[in-house]
Amino acid sequence: MSRPTRQVLALSILITLVTLVAGCSGLVPGFEDTESDIEQDALISHADDVDSYTMETTRTLQAPTVTENTTLEATVDRTSHSAQLLSTTETDVGDGPQTETTEQYIDDGVQYTNEDDNWDTTSFDNESDWEQLDQLETAVGTLEDADLEQIRTESIDGTETTMYEVNVSDDQYATLAGLESQEQQHVQTGVEQLVYYVYIDTERDELRGTDLRMEVTQGDGSALVTTQTIFGAFDDTPSISAPDAAEAALEG
């Protein structure tokens, strides 16, 4: 797999990979009645019908030797299989923060990647790659046959939602933790704790966000990671096309 393809997969995988908060095991002020009142079938059906959406992800990793903050802003158009992504990562290993920004477009089966004002291109016509990128589909998939417990109400971009804790199955646990993709790794990653929340607009049967938290160990080290993703602008996104400079890189 080429470097640009690995980059876009990394951007999408970070949304569902590892997230944790020390000591967080669902200790959040909740409702007295914890029965879920959502129609999961309607929620899944609504998400399946969405043609385009925006996505904002914030990820923070804290370890003894490094702090890393990543933001990802994305627009995804399922109909045209196109996407626009902007990722900014700030890493501090003790000598001050270093920032890296990556801009990407997926358009007409081509992935355009811009780093340091240098555009690169690669093919992006593999269906499995697109499935990795479509994080709304991934997030909704975690709710199939899941048990949900109400936690509290939460405002997401001015819309009142209900926050639920998802009682994750063993299969979903491995997927959310990213453990399925580490078979070839020499140093295995372990998960000490995993808590997964979702934000649902029960009036419209819309999944508006996810919040995944866990403690990760690798070798003798450990890290606390938190990742929150917010979905919005359903079927109300601008058209996506690669800029002229990116297309010039393809022609060159």
Image: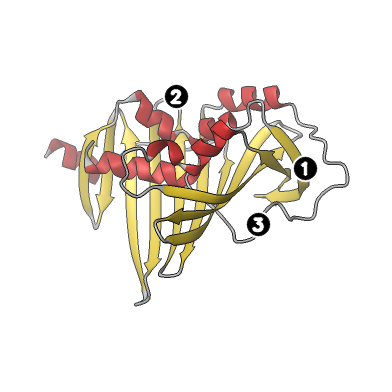
Residue drawn at x 82%, y 41% as measured from the top left: 34
In this rendering, the label closer to the viewer, 2 or 1 = 1
In this rendering, the label closer to the viewer, 1 or 3 = 3
Q: Quadrant of residue 84?
A: top left
In this rendering, the label closer to the viewer, 3 or 2 = 3
Q: Would you say 125 lies left or right of 202 here?
A: left
Q: Pointer 1 and pointer 3: residues touching (CB < 8 Å)?
A: no
**Element type where label 2 sits in the image:** loop
Q: Nearer the viewer, residue 112 or 244?
A: 112
> Is residue 235 shown to the viewer in this render?
no
Q: CA distance from mark 3 to mark 2?
A: 39 Å
First in sequence, mark 1 or 3: give its number: 3
**Element type where label 1 sits in the image:** strand
The residue labelled by disc 3 is 24
The residue labelled by disc 1 is 150
User: Residue 185 at what x, y percent from top left?
Assistant: 32, 44
> Is residue 200 shown to the viewer in this render?
yes
The residue labelled by disc 2 is 79
Residue drawn at x 39%, y 50% as measured from the top left: 86
Query: Callout 2, which amino acid?
Result: Thr
Q: Pointer 2 and pointer 1: residues touching (CB < 8 Å)?
A: no
Quarter of the figure with the N terminus: top left
Q: CA distance from mark 1 to mark 3?
A: 16 Å
